[in-house]
Amino acid sequence: MESLVGTWRLIRFNLRRDRIRLAVWIVLLVLVPVATANAIATLYPDEAARQQLATTVNANPAFLALLGPVYDTSVGGLTAWRIGTIVAFLIGLMAILSVVRHTRDEEETGRQELLAATVLGRHAPLTAALAISIGAGLVIAVLLTAGLVSQGLPLAGSAAYGFGLAAVAATFAGFGAVAAQLTQNASSARSIGVAIVGLSFLLRLAGDAGESNGISWLSWLSPIGWFTQLRPFAGEEWWIFLLWLGLTAILAATAFAISARRDVGAGAFPPRPGPAFAARSLSSAFGLSWRLQRGALLGWLIGLAVLGVVYGAVGDSIGDLLEDTPQIAQIFEQLGGVQGITDVFFSTVVGILALIASAYGIRSVLKLRVEEEASRAEPVLATATRRQPWAASHLIYGLLGPALILLIAGAVAGATYGAIIGDVANQTGRVLEAAAVQLPAVWVLSGAAMALFGLLPEYTGLSWGLLVACLVFGQLGRILQFPQWLLDISPFTHIPLVPAEDLRILPLAILTTIALVLVVAGLAGFRRRDLQTP
Amino acid sequence: MPAAIEIKDMVKTFGPTRALDGLDLEVATGEVHGFLGPNGAGKTTAIRILLGLLRQDSGTAVMLGGNPWTDITELHRRLAYVPGDVMLWPNLSGGEVIDLLGRLRGGLDQKKRARLLERFDLDPTKKGRTYSKGNRQKVALVAALASDVELLILDEPTAGLDPLMEAQFREEIHEVRGQGRTVLLASHILAEVEALCDRVSIVRKGRIVESGTLAELRHLTRTTVSAEVAGDPSMMRDVPGVHAVRVQDHTVELEVDPAHLSEVLQSLAPLGVHSLVSHPPTLEELFIRHYQDGATG
């Protein structure tokens, strides 16, 4: 195995580089499910309450679309339902990003050349990258199994839940390994990887929601869907592990085969020549930022529009539920009729869309930091371009970009729902309004990223921590019964749940003001500070 | 004529590191000024302050009559900069980067651009990520030299170029000087500075240790003389003004202060000179004198 010489040393070296990053992922992915199991045991102590919850969820494609089906009404079954596919999504993201980071990133920056010239086997970097992702998955699996058992859940279900997630991690590590072979630059490989995780999630969502339309096979195409099919705590289908293992083996073999045939630094596709002269549009900082940002903007726009279509399509099923079960219909009638429950659904949906749009906003603002650290800001700022316009040229993507993405996704969801129920004009407007109301909270996160960039540039990574906090608070804050002051940290807590609730302007105005102050502080800080170029 | 660049008593610290420690630098308008020093001496820091990318802790800098920190737009229209480590956008072609940087500076001369691309043998259609270090440097050089600016600031511009391209670069700089433009050339390549520069400032640990024309600097150092003679050259040790005398049989090698050169020749002549080689100090020697730790400027 000469091609693997040095793998073990490389693993240790990369673990050292990633010690904080990996620790954060592991703690997050272990603590959240264990805390959820604990909360569900407290909130739904008796079987009858859990039964009622399961009936409501399973009868309704809109609920199925959000979280998948409930297979078992035990505490474990509800835990696996409430915090199953979202954790599978996150662990897949972790695995894919980690593999790209340790393979294509290293090649693109040329650091791998430094290592490749030492005693290091040809396949060592890829093997080490896969080993770290899979190893991290296994550590999470062991800790999760122990954690869930400590909450009094059965061992078999706990192990299926934990090791199922590890299998998801291994599969997406395989996808990451292939993506890293195809493209020459790491950011494209990352985009492909994130698109694969997103698509898997979407297939799961559409399959679960389309149970009655006969498209439930869609979720069988998704490694995240397999996690639902594994049925932890609900008569585990252990053979599902064969699917993950098989796919992982195929993906890894493909990656190694491509890697063995290509040169270090090269991709599967030869680079195409570009234009010898710049287009007229490439004449200013804004022209440059458009070139650098347009691909990502388009990708996110398409991704969220597709998500909007899917959510819009399942929105109609709320009405079916009420017709099928008169008792429940009666309850909802008191809550405000069909429109009431549909409104609750869509205000939940725009909340999810807003979190995704926030991720785009943060990423776009932090492009400033990427450019600065890669020494590409320096030559631009050495021309007649002042700092503020340069910062603004990327900042607009962090502020207007998520607005565009969110509004289009909201409008598409509303229009899809409207087309099904035959009321496009009204429904488009309603969901669009619900999406627009989320914007001030999205801007607060972009503003926080900008403030960090201007004032504490070494800590811009904290913006992602803020987003994760908002995600955890929003998705689990109530079920985990966090104190209100903690929930209040998230700007999304203060957004009125339009259309289910009335529109209140004051919190929106306050959030917009906070966002504005953060942006201004960031711009002012950047104007005064040193440019940090290696 | 006022100086193009005037830095006085400039201090810049990064945490515990004192990158600039009372730096003084004067570059006259129309001259090619060598800014010479080893890695980490503070050359790049000083340049980044001149470009308004860093802010000094104390001291003053005047460039082209303006303040480098506040008068960004006005000053940067009149200068072009080539960084020491050129990084390009991976998905932009070299030609696009040249045009972009030129336009951001206020325009570039298309004829010059075409001539420079040919001179440096650079393919402008390749994407940024596919260029080698040397070719990335050429992209930045073409972008800078194709602009009609008063001041060129070049930070080790030839570090990645092969000797052929280095020669092309020197010719370009000669032309630039002929047009009366000012060049600040930071370098640790002595031959380059020797070949191109009117005046040189040598920086060490954030301070200028020597500044002047090459002739002035040479004045400070000793000429090296090596000779093969018929007689015994041991007596050369007693000649005034000589240093580091090494004698082996009939050959002698020594360094002599410029003032005592004729005494050395007079003492050698009676010994019966078979061969005589004498050379002025190279910048290499200047350099070594200044950068050996413990040496004084």
Image: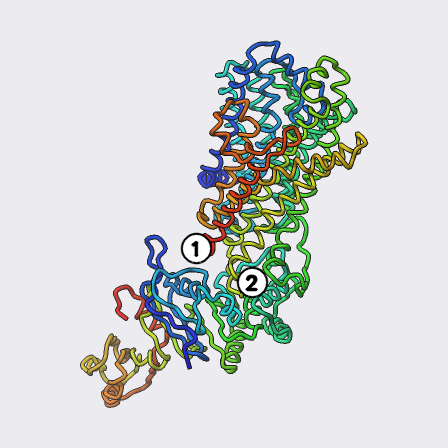
* Up-down relation of residue B282 to residue A56 (above or below): below
- Amino acid type at circle 2 is Arg
- Numbered tag placed on residue A252 in the rendering: none
- Classify residue A229 by image quadrant: top right
Q: Nearer the viewer, mark 2 or mark 1?
A: 1
Where is residue A390 drawn, in percent x and y? 55, 57
Q: In the visual, does A313 lie left or right of B69?
A: right
Specify the quadrant that holds the C terminus of chain A: bottom left
Q: Name which residue lies at 31% across and 79% down.
A: B224
- Can you identify the residue that label 1 sits on? A529
* Up-down relation of residue A2 to residue A65 (above or below): below
* Up-down relation of residue B71 to residue A365 (above or below): below
Where is residue B123 drawn, in percent x and y? 64, 66
Chain that bears disc 2: B
- Can you identify the residue that label 2 sits on? B136
Q: Hey, which residue is sitting farthest left in the picture?
A: B238
Question: Do the residues under discs 2 and 1 have CB atoms within 8 angstroms?
Answer: no
Give how far apart the Cα atoms at labels 2 and 1 are.
28 Å
